[in-house]
Image (cartoon, rainbow, N blue to C red):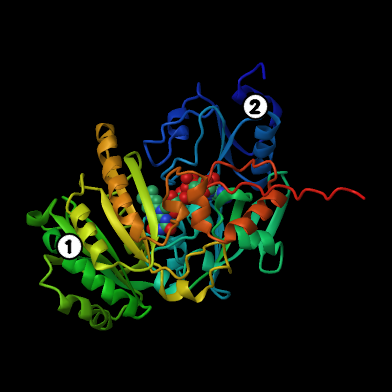
Amino acid sequence: MSSTPVQAARSELTGFTGELIGPDDTGYEEARSVYNAMADKRPALVARCADADAVARVIGFARAHSLPLAVRGGGHHGAGLGTVDGGVVADLSPLKDIQVDPEARTVRVGGGCVWGEVDQATHAHGLATPSGIVSTTGVGGLTLGGGLGHLTRRCGLAIDNLLEADIVLADGRRVRASADENSDLFWAIRGGGGNFGVVTSFVFRLHEISTVVAGPTFWPVEIGAEVLAAYRDFIPNASRELNGFFMFGCVPPAPPFPEELHLRKTAGVMWCYTGDDTEAAAREMAPLLDALPQPMLHAVGPMPHPVLQSMFDGLYPPGHQWYWRADFVDDIPDDAVELHAKFGAEVPTMQSTMHLYPIDGAAHDVGPEDTPWAYRGSRWASVFAGVDPDPANAELIKRWSVDYNEALHPYSAGGAYVNMMMDEGQERVRASYRGNYERLARIKADRDPDNVFRLNQNIQPAPKPSHEARP
Ligand code: FAD
């Protein structure tokens, strides 16, 4: 290419519906950045795609010029998968269309939406679909990797509520995937990440969830082992209406938290009871609260579902340093509890945290081979997240996250949730899909044989079967 990629794109992609942004353009700094400031990359071209045709043309452009292609939904992946040095970013952020069908209880969502936009639209009808715990996370990446959050125990993972997807394939063809159409692809995208194509629109099932009873309970970190052991014994027996993820972290130094608790290290549970009956919620939480000493804070009350969904947004704005590790966990023996308590008491910065997200309840209704998400028998997804605004602390938070994970990994089920892993290599990706990897690799070979979509937790195309020697 004698011209730069952005010059070539401007001359070749005439009538492109969207924006083509190169390193010399105003707005490039903003266009190149993703959520994790550690992923500080400089693409040659950021193509903001306003429709599926634009997506297909950008894929074709990247292929024609042998440029690596990153596909960006919300840009939240910890490994910075939504950007690439010297390559092309297909930025889906203009794909914002949201259509709620309250009768059918479905929502159609553009591939570049973030969850807060969806939550607001569905809440207007008293409805919700499972997503995560931060409203700025992209629908695209979260869903394609699985999607766990406050509604997991009641409604399952995001993929368990996915009904249909419109996809642009590596060769530019546009297809629909559902249980009845391109069912191989529909299976693969429910956990297999962005390996198979670019999803320009998703259709999700909606649930009658409007007000929830939610908020945190915090105990002093000094009794972290006692709190975790009690939580471990409690949550698997709680009803599906109650979700509660365990956390080690710090009390944020801001309202509504009382000043005397600011920055106190804590072992806590973040609750979500899916209903508006505060007494019923209290009854559900009581066995855990009764089993433990008085908490230092129990700030649980009724709130609209989107308020809960955005509760962490202020604490975790974009542009901070992130390093995280993850595992799936079947059980938490006492030895593991002690190790958790040790590392939990050593959180290195105010935003660094360890979460144990329950993945039982409705998520266990789906079999391990029904979708690529293989760990349906596990009870928790753990994440060890080192977070801080200051790049000078990058090594500190990484060290804590890695050391913590390495200490606990021997107690894990083997693989990890692909949405909460860094770039940790093929063996780790394989372990995360267990026996489903081979089927994913065959579908990949069929749908993306040249591995155009490789900036993800990559599934390598299965080798073509070697032909038998002819007689
Ligand atoms: P991106 O970085 O844009 O994309 C991630 C991957 O998905 C890339 O490989 C990209 O190519 C691909 N992709 C994105 N959109 C599309 C699309 N439309 N078509 C094809 N491929 C696409 N996860 C949870 O499950 N639950 C949580 O509660 C949760 N909380 C989080 C909170 C924070 C603050 C952060 C940073 C992450 C959180 N995550 C959570 C993890 C999150 O699911 C992943 O980071 C996810 O990949 C983010 O999706 P994205 O579209 O924002 O990311």
User: Where residue 50 sits in the image (x, y, percent)?
Assistant: 60, 43
Q: Amino acid at mark 1?
A: Gly
Left or right of 201 in this view: 390: left
Q: Residues within 10 Å of mark 1 (few under 14, many from 20)?
A: many
Badge nearest the viewer, 1 or 2: 1
User: Where residue 210 sits in the image (x, y, percent)?
Assistant: 39, 72
Left or right of 199 in this view: 313: left
Q: Amino acid at mark 2?
A: Arg
Residue drawn at (32%, 50%) of the image: 406
For label 1, the SS is: helix
Cα distance between the residues tagged 1 and 2: 57 Å
The residue where tag 1 is placed is: 224
Taking the view exactly as shown, the residue that stands out farthest to the front is 471
Residue drawn at (61%, 59%) of the image: 188
Numbered label tally: 2
- Foreground: 101 or 295? 295
For label 2, the SS is: helix
**Taking 203 as reference, is 55 above or below it?**
above
User: Where residue 72 sits in the image (x, y, percent)?
Assistant: 52, 43
Q: Which mark is residue 10?
A: 2
Left or right of 449 in this view: 346: left
Q: Identify the mark nearer the N-term, 1 or 2.
A: 2
